[in-house]
Image (cartoon, grey):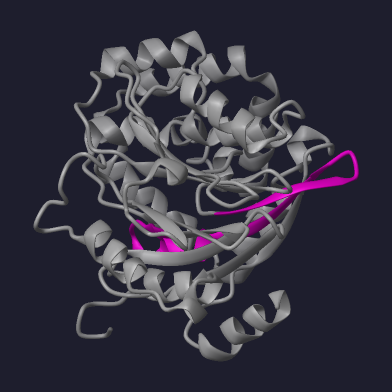
């Protein structure tokens, strides 16, 4: 049955783009761990059709609030609190071998989401959890700009000490962490942007100087921590760890109804939404959808992704309560939209992650 579903994907979905697969060995020398990933992108697309326009875009639209001293402050904090990650970033700087790509510059990228919560309003990403039979199917769309961001997205296979730990699909992997993750035999995870009252720049820098990890490093910690070896332990950790901006954790487990959405904020406590406490009224299957707004608030009229996805999931026929059914929801406008550049389907019960590089679509395309 697993192979039948995969065959249906590959034979039905013909417009997706291949995402290069790279193996990351976390037991290798830190400076060497990410060099192949950088080299692969540059060999495939060249700097001017990959990292170059992405860096230029976010220099203008995200990092414009930073002063020269801010780069040094963040870099010093990372050197102090995360020496291993610092060595990995040093290796990436070496591989770029460009005067404008310094350790200080990549340091601010490590806290991209936290800085963007001050400088930008980003509508991005949709996550779906579907509980059916004895498993959880986890769909994830990533929406972001500029278009060349597609060319730096990789499918990462992560191992340590000879053991394969999990997989990730991401465009921000060069900050040596993950915002989506499949931890084998434990859980599937993704982070979604959350609209909330922003921190001040001074508040954010206080967190950074105290050593609060970036969002991407939280999932890296989940991946390598042997004690976080069950769905419940991962959920408890991500409900309680310190964070430096508002966001959502969407987590699927290995068994029926193991699915939650955790709404995080540096200062406020919010309720966790669970599949097994859902009030959706479905007796045979349950589902949750997360975009960028709290569940207790209605969708804004100009962004109905959650409402539309919930309606589609509520109408799924029995033969579509599977990975293919979730993909059809993720591939429907406006869930798949002008900014969508990848879709992934994860299933922690079977340690399966299926990745699709997606083209931009508009309502008329769909």
Residue 40 horizontal side relative to residue 204, left or right: right
**Which residues are the magenta region?**
141-169
**327 or 193, nearer to the observer:** 327
Residue visible at 33% across and 30% down in the picture: 246
Label tally: 0
Residue 126 horizontal side relative to residue 164, left or right: left
Residue visible at 63% across and 35% down in the picture: 220
Would you say residue 161 sits in the magenta stretch? yes
**Is residue 218 something one can see in this rendering?**
yes
Q: Is residue 240 above or below residue 22?
A: above
Would you say residue 167 sits in the magenta stretch? yes
Q: Position of residue 24 (x, y in %)?
A: 75, 48
Residue 187 horizontal side relative to residue 335, left or right: right
Q: Is residue 305 above or below residue 253?
A: below
**327 or 272, nearer to the observer:** 272
Q: Position of residue 228 (x, y in %)?
A: 69, 30
Quarter of the C terminus within the rendering:
bottom left
Q: Is residue 295 above or below residue 284?
A: above
The quarter of the picture where residue 204 lies is top left
**45 or 354, nearer to the observer:** 354
Q: Is residue 350 above or below residue 207?
A: below
Residue 129 horizontal side relative to residue 355, left or right: left
Q: Position of residue 6 (x, y in %)?
A: 65, 79
């Amino acid at each position: 049955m697993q192979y039948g579903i995969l065959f249906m994907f590959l034979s039905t979905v013909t417009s997706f783009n291949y995402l290069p697969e790279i193996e990351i060995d976390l037991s290798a020398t830190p400076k060497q761990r990410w060099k192949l990933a950088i080299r692969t992108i540059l060999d495939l697309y060249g700097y001017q059709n990959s990292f170059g326009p992405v860096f230029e875009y976010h220099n203008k639209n995200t990092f414009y609030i930073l002063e020269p001293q801010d780069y040094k402050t963040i870099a010093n904090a990372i050197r102090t609190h995360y020496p291993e990650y610092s060595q990995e970033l040093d290796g990436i700087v070496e591989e770029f071998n460009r005067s404008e790509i310094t350790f200080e510059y990549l340091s601010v990228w490590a806290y991209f989401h936290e800085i963007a919560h001050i400088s930008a309003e980003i509508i991005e990403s949709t996550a779906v959890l579907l509980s059916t039979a004895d498993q959880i199917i986890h769909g994830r769309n990533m929406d972001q700009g500029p278009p060349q961001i597609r060319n730096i997205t990789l499918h990462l296979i992560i191992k340590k000490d000879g053991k394969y730990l999990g997989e990730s699909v991401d465009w921000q992997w060069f900050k040596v962490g993950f915002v989506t993750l499949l931890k084998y035999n434990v859980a599937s995870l993704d982070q979604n942007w959350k609209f909330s009252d922003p921190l001040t720049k001074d508040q954010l820098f206080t967190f950074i100087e105290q050593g609060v990890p970036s969002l991407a490093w939280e999932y890296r910690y989940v991946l390598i921590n042997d004690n976080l070896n069950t769905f419940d332990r991962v959920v408890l950790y991500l409900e309680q760890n310190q964070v430096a901006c508002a966001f959502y954790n969407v987590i699927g487990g290995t068994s029926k109804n193991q699915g939650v959405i955790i709404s995080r904020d540096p200062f406020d406590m919010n309720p966790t939404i669970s599949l097994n406490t859902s009030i959706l009224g479905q007796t045979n299957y349950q589902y949750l959808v997360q975009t960028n707004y709290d569940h207790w608030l209605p969708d804004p009229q100009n962004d109905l992704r959650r409402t539309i996805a919930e309606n589609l999931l509520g109408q799924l026929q029995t033969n579509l309560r599977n990975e293919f059914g979730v993909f059809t929801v993720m591939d429907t406008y406006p869930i798949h939209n002008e900014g969508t550049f990848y879709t992934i389907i994860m299933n922690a019960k079977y340690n399966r992650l299926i990745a699709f590089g997606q083209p931009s679509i508009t309502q008329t395309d769909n």
